[in-house]
Image (spheres, rainbow, N blue to C red):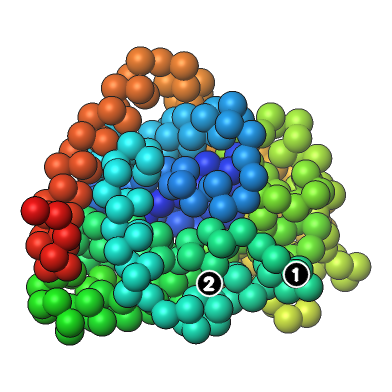
Amino acid sequence: MKRVFSGVQPTGNIHIGNYLGALKQFVELQDENECIYCIVDEHAITVPQDPKELKKHILDVAALYMAIGIDPKKSIVFVQSSVSGHAELGWVLNCAANTGELFRMTPFKAKSQGKQSVGAGLLTYPVLMAADILLYDTDIVPVGNDQKQHIELTRDLAIRVNAKYGKDTFVVPDGRFMKSGARIMALDDPTSKMSKSAPNDHSRISLLDEPSKIKKSIMRATTDSDGIVKFDIENKPGVSNLLSIYSAFTGKTVEELEAEYDGHGYGDFKKDLVEVTVNALAPIKERYNEIRESQELIDALKDGAERADAIARKTMERVRDRFGLGL
């Protein structure tokens, strides 16, 4: 079986863009692969966090992982900081990375633009991301296209270390880019990706939103004035985005939906999409509420950390030996 690794930051509520674009496929991957799914809390502190809120969000995300169908008996689910190998390997790889390649990373350039100084973690977190992946001899990393640069850096570091310290020091992973058709955009601005941090709460639908909020967000969603339900990203980005959401939740093709709503206005289309979305999210919310405060969740994370640490320790023994670290 191939080994799969991925992680999600515990910052804010997971929205349908995260779910339809990536997490839904994480569930599918666990049936035929050895999957390791991590809550990357060490990445979260590259920007200031309230400690109490961070701890809460860690458990929120872990519960949502399980609520959407990630099975801790099939997959390893754990919190990044519970396994010390992440930070240790991150430092080792920092010593193998070059500042030039880190300064070229798109997120650093975007987030540091116009600022005299930023936290060093913002520059080096892609190396920690590489450590997350390489620590588990990962074969496949399921990511969106916006993460391609991070996968390239991870592969470059693995190949560089292997060339200097031995070709089997690290498994060189492959990125598996998410299936097309589930790129979910902001409801208020369909030219931008749906975001946890957008100031307009109605720009997104979170997995735990109440039906009344879901209805309000969809009915307010940006469309256009011609009233024709047709997929055309260039000329009708708002309607196209809503069609993508409808298709992803129901399994109906965009063509089937266009035919179904031929001659109908946006009102009928949006009302039906509200019902589809509420019904799709209801079982996730129900399962989340069952496990969020349960011992089941804590036990799953503790067991996942032990299983992850067992793999990580073997990798770090190999890395320390190759680099000449320790006695």
- Rate crowding at label 1 as few (under 14), some (14 to 19) or many (20 or more) other CA atoms within 10 Å: few
Query: Which three-letter amino acid code belongs to the residue tagged 1?
Result: Gln
151 displayed left or right of 185? left
Q: Residue furthest front?
A: 327
Task: Say whether residue 313 is left or right of residue 106.
Answer: left
Q: Are marks 2 and 1 in contact (CB under 8 Å)?
A: no
Between 227 and 128, the residue placed more toward the observer is 128
Q: Which mark is residue 74?
A: none
Q: Which x, y percent locates residue 177? A: 40, 71
Amino acid type assigned to the residue bearing label 2 in the image:
Asp
| As drawn, 269 above or below 304 | below
Q: For the residue labelled by badge 2, is the local secondary structure a helix, a strand or a loop?
A: helix
The residue lying toward the viewer, choosing from 256 and 74, is 74
Q: In the image, is 75 to the left or to the right of 10?
A: left
Residue at 67% from the left image edge and 57% from the top image edge: 194
Taking the spot 17% from the left edge, 82% from the top edge, the residue there is 164
Q: Quadrant of the N terminus?
A: bottom left
Which residue does the numbered mark 2 point to in the structure image? 146
- Residue where numbered disc 1 is placed: 116
What residue is shown at x 54% (from left), y 47% (from top)?
Answer: 44
Q: Viewer-proximal residue, 49 or 57?
A: 49
Q: Secondary structure at mark 1?
A: loop
Residue 257 can be seen in this image: no
Q: Image height check: is 307 above or below 103?
A: above
